[in-house]
Amino acid sequence: MATKPGILTDWPWKPLGSFKYVILAPWAVHSTYSLMVKGESERDPVYFLILPFLLVRMLHNQIWISLSRYRTAKGNNRIVDKGIEFEQVDRERGWDDQILFNGVLFYVGYMINLPGTHNLPFWRSDGVVMATLLHAGPVEFLYYWLHRALHHHYLYSRYHSHHHSSIVTEPITSVIHPFAEHIAYFILFAIPLLTTSFAGTASIASYFGYITYIDFMNNLGHCNLELIPKWLFTVFPPLKYFMYTPSFHSLHHTKFRTNYSLFMPIYDHMYGTMDKSSDALYEASLKRREELPDVVHLSHLTTPESIYHLRLGFASLASRPHTSKWYLWSMWPVTLLWSLILTSNYGQTFVLESITFKKLKLQSWMIPKYNINYMLQWRRESLNNLIEEAILDAEVRGVKVLSLGLLNQGEELNKNGELYIQKYPHLKIKLVDGSSLVVAVVLNSIPKGTTQVFLRGNLTKVAYAIADALCEMGIQVALPYKDEYEKLQLRLTTKVKNSLILSTSFADQKTWLVGDGWNENEQLKALKGTLFIPFSQFPPKKMRKDCFFYSTPAMITPTSFINMHSCENWLPRKVISAWRIAGILHALEGWNVNECGNTLLNIEDVWRASLRHGFRSFIVPV
């Protein structure tokens, strides 16, 4: 929002929220009906193609978003190093409003029968040339002076400051303006469209091609990556006056009073507003290498629709905890296609996110496999190969610590990471399964004064450690089944084994510690007001509205985390899993030991280290 919002700041359909697309429904239905029902002489494919073209524009923008976020996470050719925060993602959530606005105007123009807008040919060379010349002349010239006017204090504070709230730009930053500004921009960009229409030289190619050019150049200029190769300007030196670069426009967002041109810097050269550091920044950005991280968190996809919740997916969904959305079900063909591409044998681990914290470069890497893949025994070898390749790649890059997230660590899959240490005993990188911090988080989530807890779920490394610590603290640990009770008895290291009890009643304890592999219907036997505390990687299904559920083990991040603008799976904003934090602590503390297999660090030391570095308890009962 601008510092002093002026009139026509908000879009007219803002009250409709996510249902704003219904305003196009009448035209979309009518154009489809006209194409299918009317006679061949009355059909006009131009009318029908408006909606598909709007959808193609959305896809075009989404490709730019994914590409930009992927490349900026890797770091090569990145222009500005500052981070993006959740506030910017929220501000730029309505990037599709301008496409919707254009769609309305196209439909209205067609319905009022503007000259030269019906039954257009696919191509007319004279119309394409005319549109090109009109853009290079009047449009670029008028935009330059309009842009300078928008930087006048009066207009800047009421309108254009909204756009400049984003110092570090993303492709969609290009279209984040108040409604009034978009009206002015459309009037400018309509000059080539209307002129060719009235002159009778318009074509489908000139219309859709010109708008696609505007989208492409807008996204290019705001992607925060230098993508224009130097040889282009070497082969044709005058090109620098007729084509801007991402670094050229990036300077406008960091210095505000230079580089005002739309796509052609010639007017900045003519009127003396060209930033003197433009060439130097361009050269430096081209030479920038891929960033080498200190800590890597290795995770994986969860469900097919989780691809949309990734940072590389839909920005608005990634900035919120992962919840199922009804409209994603309608996209199942696209979801299926992406699933086949990502999870095929050619799918490779990729960089998902890059964050800075206390001079440490933190990255999240993603293995393109779903939960279901980890449950299939015949896929274990290929999964271990992918994890092994990621570890060896991190070793070559000089990564200090790699933490294993979600199902990338498991006793049956790889003995909690010990498999890789046994195979490569001379690894310099430290592997962390995060069990010690998970135990610490769970122990500190149990309400004070608790004397007895109910333990449910698979008896994993974490479950044994929690039970052992609780018995040492004098808190009774109850299990309902004799085989689990006896198995736990054998593994307890504490001498206070009498704190472990066999309880066939499910209604004696009001604090339940739950992991994976338990019968979630057992919730129905719990007392009203029972507190469920997960120690598993995945949250339990909530089947009781009269009980309380904590999140999976996690902590709130310090405010000094830079470039954090997406949520980790189902966790809220600025909250990350204990498994991920464990790797960060390992690097910060310089612990020269692998936390894999049966190895556990001192629980109290790990907990104190997390608090010392600014992480805070996250206990929000639902």
Image (cartoon, grey):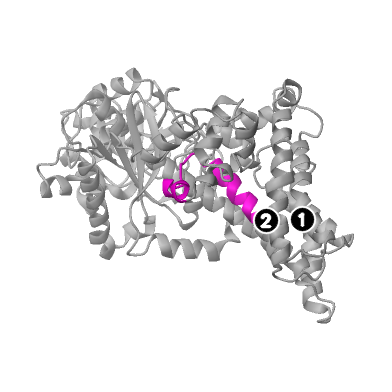
Q: Which mark is residue 193?
A: 1
Q: Residue furthest right?
A: 112
Q: What's the amino acid at mark 2?
A: Tyr
Residue displayed at 30% across by 30% down:
584
For residue 41, above or below residue 537: below
> Residue 210 — which label?
2
Lower sequence index among marks 2 and 1: 1
**Residue neighbourhood size for the residue with mark 2, other residues' Cα within 10 Å, grouped as few (<14), some (14–19), many (≥20):** some
Q: Is mark 2 in CB contact (under 8 Å) with mark 1?
A: yes
**What label sits on residue 167 in the rendered view?**
none
Q: Main secondary structure of the magenta part?
A: helix
- Is residue 225 rendered magenta in the image? yes
Q: In the figure, is residue 243 to the left or right of 228?
A: right
Q: Within the magenta stretch, is there residue 582? A: no
Would you place residue 238 above or below residue 55 in this image? above
Which region is colored magenta?
211-235
Q: x, y (%) of residue 12? A: 80, 42
SS for dot 2:
helix
Residue 401 quadrant:
top left
In the rendering, at what x and y percent does residue 516 appear? 35, 47
